[in-house]
Image (tube, rainbow, N blue to C red):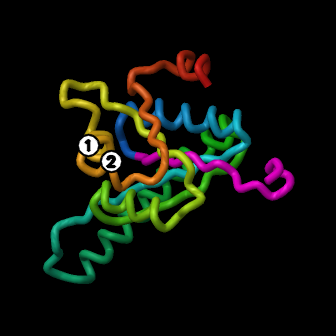
Amino acid sequence: MGDSAQGRVRRTFLVVVDESEEMRAALRYACRRARRTGGQVALLRIIQPREIQHYALIGESMADELRYQASSHLNEIATDVQHISGTAPVLLICEGESSEELLKLLRDKPNISVLVLAAGTGADGPGPLVSALTGRLAHLVRIPVTIVPGAMTDDAIDAMT
């Protein structure tokens, strides 16, 4: 098949967005690779399930607030992504357990080409998602997983991408 102007599917780099400091390293890496390869970035925010609520209305209101917060967070990041990568990102929100939702998304979205994660920088190890997807769930991942050291500086990431 020809280049992207002739209908080739764009390479999509998926970044799982959370509140961790190291997520920024994964995000920058994905943006730089997307720019370099003519691809795009997809941002995934996974909302963790809450305890069962006694009153359905309160539970639904809390769920709506969590979805709103997730959407707002993704939209804030999207501006930086577009600036660095050169294209607007795809924004995705899922609700559930992180590794299960991520694997389901990868099954349902065959256009996602590469999963970009950052390893945690603390004594607790690389983080639960990195540990799960490189350990007990590795056989279920159908695409390459790039793990960026969470402590990498922007300059170091830029130099290698």
Local SS, label 2: helix
Label 2 amino acid?
Ala
Q: How many marks?
A: 2
What residue is drawn where x is 27% and y is 60%? 97
Image location of residue 124, percent across then percent down: 19, 30
Q: Give whichever of 128, 1 is nearer the camera.
A: 1
Q: Are marks 2 and 1 in contact (CB under 8 Å)?
A: yes
Q: Whole-Å distance between the Cαs marked 2 and 1?
A: 5 Å
Would you place residue 19 above or below residue 75 in this image? above
Mark 1: secondary structure: loop
* Residue named by callout 1: 135
Residue 37 found in image quarter: top right
Residue designated by label 2: 138
The outermost residue toward the bottom is: 56
Instruction: Tell me the kind of residue under disc 1.
Output: Gly
Camera-side residue of 154 and 161: 161
Quadrant (top left/top right/bottom left/bottom right) for the C terminus? top right
Q: Write the start and end of the magenta stretch as one range.
A: 1-17
The picture places residue 115, in percent across and down from the top left corner, at 48, 45
Residue 15: say if magenta: yes
Q: Which mark is residue 102?
A: none
In percent of the image, x 45 and y 20: which residue is there? 152
The stretch drawn in magenta includes residue 3: yes
Direction from residue 49 to residue 92 in the image, left or right: right
Q: At 39% from the left edge and 27% from the top edge, which residue is drawn?
A: 150
Q: Residue at x 56, y 50 (%)?
A: 113
Residue 39: quarter of image: top right
